[in-house]
Image (cartoon, rainbow, N blue to C red):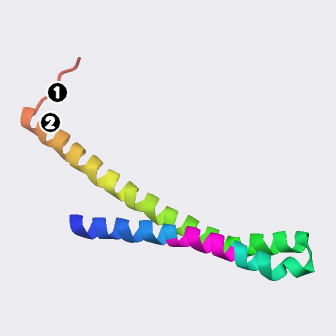
Amino acid sequence: MLMKNRSFDKMVSFMQGASWGLVILGAYLFFTLFYPFGFIVALIGGFFGASIGVFMVIFFEMAHIKQEMYKEKIKHTEILENILKHIKKDEKLSDN
């Protein structure tokens, strides 16, 4: 399972980088496409061209955050099970 997580992390990181490339490419292409219609129109076009890539960046960042949360939950579960095992081993708790 550890290898599967590493490959997932690598894939998400690659897709985040590709999404940033799409942001730059989309902004450049839409800006140059709309530049003959005026500078303000070109800026708006560049914004819309970049928004597709930004959406993908946010999506893959959320996937990365969810994966990190999953890893932390597994660590916390292991710690809590270890604590429970030690409590059952002692069988009584002090009142202090």
Q: Is residue 45 left or right of residue 20?
A: right
- The three-letter amino acid code for the residue at tag 2 is Ile
The spot of residue 36 in percent (x, y) is 89, 81
Residue 45 makes an appearance in the image: yes
**Relative vertical location of residue 92 with respect to residue 38 in this rendering, above or below:** above
The quarter of the image holding the N terminus is bottom left
The spot of residue 61 in percent (x, y) is 51, 62
Mark seen at residue 93 = 1
**Relative vertical location of residue 74 with respect to residue 87 in this rendering, above or below:** below
Farthest left residue in view: 89
Residue 1 makes an appearance in the image: no
Q: Nearer the viewer, mark 1 or mark 2?
A: 2
The quarter of the image holding the C terminus is top left
Q: What residue is shown at x 84% (from left), y 80% (from top)?
A: 34
Mark seen at residue 87 = 2
Q: Is residue 16 left or right of residue 81?
A: right
Q: Residues within 10 Å of mark 2 (few under 14, many from 20)?
A: few
Q: Earlier in the sequence, mark 1 or mark 2?
A: 2
Check if residue 89 falls in the magenta segment: no
Q: Is residue 81 left or right of residue 55?
A: left
Q: Nearer the viewer, residue 20 or 93?
A: 20
Magenta stretch bounds: 18-26
Label 2 residue SS: helix
Q: Nearer the viewer, residue 88 or 44?
A: 44
Q: Is residue 29 left or right of residue 80?
A: right
Q: State which quadrant residue 89 falls in.
A: top left
Q: What residue is shown at x 12% (from left), y 29% (from top)?
A: 92
Q: State which quadrant residue 54 falls in.
A: bottom right
